[in-house]
Amino acid sequence: MLWPLPVQMLNWLPDTGDPVLNTWILSWDTHALVTNPLQLFNANTFYPLQYSLALSEHMLPHVLIFAPVYLITNNPILASNILFFCAFFLTGLSMFWLVKELTGDYWAALFAGIAFTFCPSRMAQLGHVQLLTFFYMPLVFLFFERFRKSLSWKHGILFTVFLLLQTLCSYYLGYFTVIGIFLYGSWYLIKDKLYQKAAFIFKSLVLGMFYFAGVMSLTWPYLVLKKQWNLTRTLSDLFQGSVDICTSYFVTPYSNLLYGSFSKAVNQGQYSWELPNFPGIVVILLTLTGLFLFLKYRDKYRFNRGPFVLIGVVAFVLSLGPILIFNKHVTLLPLPYFWLYDIVPGFSSLRIPARLGVMVMLFLRSSLRIQ
């Protein structure tokens, strides 16, 4: 799927756009952490601007993979490509663990891992390694599932650590994962009456404070620059990056061998490479089959698909952006994203609502069960 990069890892990147920027960011992160960690956000750009690293994602969790390779080889391109491949392998592996935990079905988990790793909405982001490192997100759901059942500190801390790491990989993925786990937790808070369990409430509040402190410790430079330069995205900025309800979930990246030519004909625009969210015919058929069997034999299933259906529906609606776009025409119909843009701190900084399509893919892959 990633050919010919495997034989060009020493001196080639996926493309010459954002991968070059991201390689510099990771190189700077490594240099700053080794030499002067307190000056991490004062990067060697735009001097004398303070906190210039905060003009982009800091991508600090990626350093766990990038830095060892870079420090040993002194080759930032090789280190970046190792991270790129790990993003695919580890995402598939973590998705496998999640579906195996939820369903107990090895083959469903294996297929879900592969299908999620190489779904079109991810293959459209080959230039954005920060959006490909989605391997903490399935672990967030996995350990929350264990935490809500056991209420143990061990599982709660692991859940919080993985949620924090996913948030710091990319604020896009952080918002997506927080929305997903909020819906997932709310489902069981009501269904299992977890609000009546004092241990769950107390431990959740403590873990929430730890998460908030961890996020804010690396987010305040962004808040300083946002206030200083009034950095925000206008609603009109979001229109180009919002899903067209008539096309986006029916097209793939142009490089797709089966559907690429069709996609190129119908999906045009400034951010056309960001919008493909077609999950694939095989995944659609298997998901529909899984949902049908679940409805027919629900008493025999150990896995409740309800919260993932909720996540999928909400993510689909939010991916449509603040205003409904119908056949490339911006209508006057406001959508839930419109109010979140004003209410939720930082939501106005997200430029591409269509990227929420990856959470729709999470629902589809988590709904699979093969017997």
Image (cartoon, grey):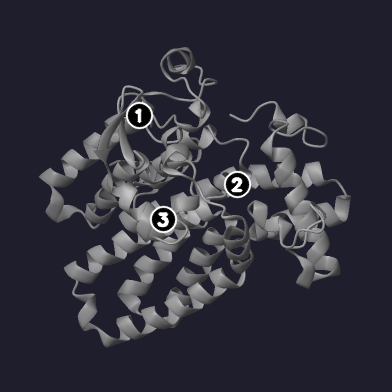
Task: Give the residue at mark 3.
Answer: 98
Q: CA distance from mark 2 to mark 3?
A: 16 Å
- Residue type marked 1: Asp
Q: Is the residue marked by circle 3 packed among few (<14), some (14-19), or many (20+) residues within 10 Å?
A: many
Q: Is residue 370 left or right of residue 358?
A: left
Residue 331: x and y, percent?
28, 30
* SS category of the residue bearing label 3: helix
Left or right? Give the position of 324 relative to 269: left
The amino acid beneath tag 3 is Leu
Nearest to viewer (mark 1 / mark 3): 1
Tell me the quadrant of the picture where the N terminus can be found.
Answer: top right
Question: Of the residues tagged 2 and 1, which is closer to the observer?
Answer: 1
In front: label 2 or label 3:
2
**Residue 200 makes an appearance in the image:** yes
Residue on which the image places disc 2: 87
Q: Position of residue 2 (x, y in %)?
A: 63, 30
Q: 339 above or below 144?
A: above
Task: Give me the residue at 78% from left, 58% from top.
Answer: 43
Q: Is residue 119 visible?
A: no
Which image quarter is the C terminus in? top left
Badge 2 or badge 1: first in the primary sequence? 2
The three-letter amino acid code for the residue at tag 2 is Ala
Q: Judge by depth and name the residue closer to the eye, 302 or 200.
A: 200
| In-front residue for pair 353/86 | 353
Residue 62 in the image: state x and y as whole percent: 66, 56
Quadrant housing residue 288: top left
Q: x and y percent of residue 20 in the render?
A: 74, 39
- State how far apart marks 1 and 3 are (Cα): 31 Å
Q: Which residue is mark 1?
A: 244
CB-based contact (under 8 Å), mark 1 and mark 3: no
Question: How far is the residue under mark 2 from the one under mark 1?
Answer: 28 Å
